[in-house]
Amino acid sequence: MSTTTGVEPAPVTSGRSEEARRFYPQLDGLRALAILLVLMNHMLDLKLPGVVAYVASLGWMGVDVFFVLSGFLITKILLSSKPGPRAFGLFVLRRTLRTWPLYFAVLFIAWLILRHDPSGIETNWLQHVFFLQNYTPWFITRTLGPTWSLCIEEHFYFIWPFFVFLLPRRVLFWVLPALFFMLPVVRYWGLHQAFTFKQLYTETQFHLDGLVAGSFVAVLISRYALRPRTVSWIGAVCFAMGIGTAFAGFRHSWDIMFGQNVVFGFTSLAIGFAGLLLLLLRNEASFLINVFSIRPLRYIGRISYGIYLFQDGSISLLNHLPLHRVLGEAATSWMLAIPLRIGFTIGLAALSYRFFESPILRMKDRLR
């Protein structure tokens, strides 16, 4: 049933846990887009032609896509759980089983390799153990640079359940937008204090836009039974407004460390990517959903966590191999280097997913 406006309060039923487990194959495709953007951002050391260089310069936005996705999926799970210590414990345990084993395996390997390297000697490894490396003023450790975003997500996993369990949905519905539009103010304050651009980019309190936007989408979907046409309309407006504002704000440079970009950039991108998420959540088939549901894309999205953790290390390893002896000048060509780097990283992640992550994930799935 639906009203003439396309919105009606969603009934609370015993099927909430089933809704939490509902699988959206197209969201794996969105993960694939995010991780491919991030990988392209790691190609800027190559001599890239204009269009490819432009795409690579946008690659950092893939992290913000991941944040929107995480906010939506995590909040959807929490909203479908009965509040209580057991629900919180199971949620944290399942999140831990998903993220910690591979992270600490990569961390241990990095420590073995870099403990005598200058960057490894300068690294505070204890910060990495407690997911606090996003609070360092500058990036130091090679191969572990991308883990700053994992810190933000881990902090979100431990804090956000209390808000969802303790606040009524109608309150969450207004708290999230208030928090969202406070974030540019907080970053503006930080920009005029002693915070570096890196801190404004990686510290949790400054970079929550995507997680908050994704969480609001989850609350919106759970609170109201929206018709597919209404979902598409809201999604299209948010996507056009967010991406349009981003292009206007970044017209001088897509570098997030440039001028006021760091103040408003995350906000506009979060709105745009939340709109894209809504376009993929409509309950009817569409061309966009079909594109993001292509099987190879879905597979890349499924193993994207491993790709994200391996990307720096795999590219660094390839750069230390004497490929020029075999390939000659072709070894430095972007046409060869890009597919080689991406293929090698995806291959490592596929092996990790098959032989290391999958057995742990089966254990996690028994804890519903």
Image (cartoon, grey):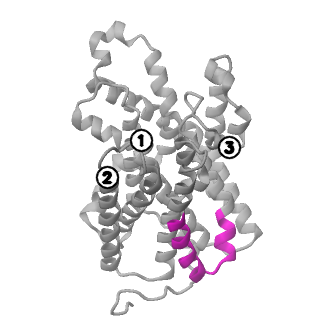
On residue 208, which mark appears?
none
**Residue at position x 61%, y 57% from top?**
365
Query: Which residue in the structure is indicated by mark 3?
Result: 132
Q: Which of 169 and 325 is in front in this view?
A: 169
Q: Is residue 132 above or below residue 334?
A: below
On residue 38, which mark appears?
1
Q: Mark 1 against mark 2, which lies toward the viewer? A: 1
Label 1: how many Cα within 10 Å (few below 14, some 14–19, many 20+):
many
Label 3: how many Cα within 10 Å (few below 14, some 14–19, many 20+):
many
**Amino acid bearing label 3:** Leu
Secondary structure mostly seen in the magenta stretch: helix
x and y, in percent, of residue 152 in the image: 60, 51
Q: Of label 3 and label 1, which has the lower sequence position?
A: 1
Going by the picture, which residue comes out furthest to the right? 85
Distance from the alpha carbon under mark 1 to that under mark 2: 20 Å
Q: Which span is picked out in magenta? A: 160-182
Q: Of label 1 and label 2, which has the lower sequence position?
A: 1
Per the image, label 2 sits on a secondary structure element best described as loop
Q: Nearer the viewer, residue 214 or 264?
A: 264
Distance from the alpha carbon under mark 3 to that under mark 1: 22 Å
Q: What is the quadrant of residue 7 in the picture?
A: bottom left
Q: Mark 2 against mark 3, which lies toward the viewer? A: 3
Marks 3/1 in contact by CB < 8 Å: the verdict is no
